[in-house]
Amino acid sequence: MRIGRDIARGVTLVVVVLAVLFVIGEIVCRLFIPDTRLRYVSDPEALYRLAPNHVGTSVLASGALAPPARINTLGFRGGEPAAGRPSIVILGDSFTFGSGVADDETFAARLDQWYGGRVSVMNGGHPGYGVFQMAATLRRVGEELRPRLVVVVVWQGDFLRQPPDADERARFMRRLQVFGALKNSVLGTHLYRRMEPLLAQVGRASLVVRAGEGGGGSEASTASVREAHIRGVQADAPRLLAIHQEASRYGRGLLIVLWPKEDFASVPEAERGLAQELTVVLEAFAQQHEVPFISVQPAMRRVTPKDRLLIPNDWHPTPLAHCLAAEQIGVALGGLGFPPLREGT
C-alpha cells in the first residue's frame, strides 16, 4: 500500500510540475513570442478559409516570412467592404491573395486604388484554393456583398486541385479540428510547428495539416501532366459556370482570368505549350457560355529576365508581376463597364 501511495504521489507531483511549466510557458509565449501566422478555420464546403479579423504572416518556400496580411470580417485580405459602393470580388489562390507581398501591392489592392473610391475591389484569394473552393467562397459571401462583377483568377496549377473524396475530406477535417484545438494554446502551436518537419521526416506527413498551400497532386511531376491539367479544366468547367450563374444574380456575372506558368516562370519540357492548350480550352468554354475571358500571359511575356516576376526562391509573383496583372485585368474591366480612373506601375 505504501509503495502504491508513493507512486501515486510521484505521478501527481510530475503532473503538477508539468502543468506549472506549461502555464509558465504559455504566459511567456503570449507575452514575448506570440503566434503571428495566418489563422484558418474549417469550412463545410471549402474545407478551410482564413479566420476573420486578424493580421498574420506566412512562411514562403525560401523560409522567409511574408509581409503581414490584414484579414477583414469576411475572411478576405484587405479593408472592410465599403458601404454604398459597388463591389468587384476577386477569387483565386495564393497568387490572388498575394503571398509574399504587402497588402497594398496585390493586384486586387492596386485595382482598388485605381478606382479612386468609386468601386470597392475585394480580395477573396485564399492560399491553396482550387476552383471548387472559389465557388464555395462566392456562395458564402454572395448575398452579403452582391458584387457587380466576380473575377476568378486561376493559376494553371489550380486545375490539379480537385475536391477530395468523402474519406479524404473526413480525414482532413479531423486533422484540422485537432490543429484548431492546439491553436487555443500559443505554446502548443509553437511546439506543433517545430514538430512538422520531424513528422515529415519520419513518414508521418499525414499528421501535418497544410491548410493554405499545396494541393498540386503527384501527377504534376509525371509525363501525364498535360492530360491532368486538361481533365482538371473539364472538371472545373461546371463550377465556373455555376459561379457565373450565381454572380449574374447580382450583376454582370463572371470574368475568367488565366495565369499560366509559361512566360511567367521557367517550365519543364512536359509543360511547354500547355499554356496555349489551356487558353484554347478555356476560350472555347467562355465563348460557348458568353463569359468574358483573358490571360495575363501577354503581360508577363513583356518582362525579361523572368526572375523579375518571381519572389526569390519562391513561385509567387513579385509586386511588378502583380502590377502587370492589374493592368491587364483593368483593361478587361474597362471593357465590361468598370473602367479604372487611372492605371500605374
Image: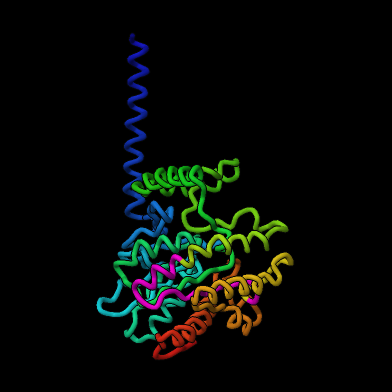
User: Of residues 141 and 72, which is closer to you in this image?
Assistant: 141
Whether residue 218 sits left or right of residue 332 in the image: it is right
Q: How many marks?
A: 0
Q: Position of residue 53 (x, y in %)?
A: 31, 62
Residue 328 sits above or below residue 234 on the image: below
Residue 84 sits above or below residue 205 on the image: below
Whether residue 183 sits left or right of residue 237 in the image: it is left
On the image, which quarter does residue 261 sit in? bottom right
User: Of residues 160 and 52, which is closer to you in this image?
Assistant: 160
Q: Position of residue 176 (x, y in %)?
A: 43, 47
Magenta range: 242-263
Is residue 253 one of those drawn in magenta?
yes
Residue 272 sits above or below residue 136 on the image: below
Which residue occupies 30% across, 73% down?
Answer: 81
Whether residue 70 sits left or right of residue 266 in the image: it is left
User: Of residues 23 and 169, which is closer to you in this image?
Assistant: 169
- Residue 37 visible in rendering: yes
User: Of residues 37 and 160, which is closer to you in this image?
Assistant: 160
Q: Position of residue 258 (x, y in %)?
A: 55, 73
Which residue occupies 53% across, 69% down?
Answer: 154
Most extreme residue toward the front, as rendered?
Answer: 288
Is residue 34 one of those drawn in magenta?
no
- Residue 33 visible in rendering: no
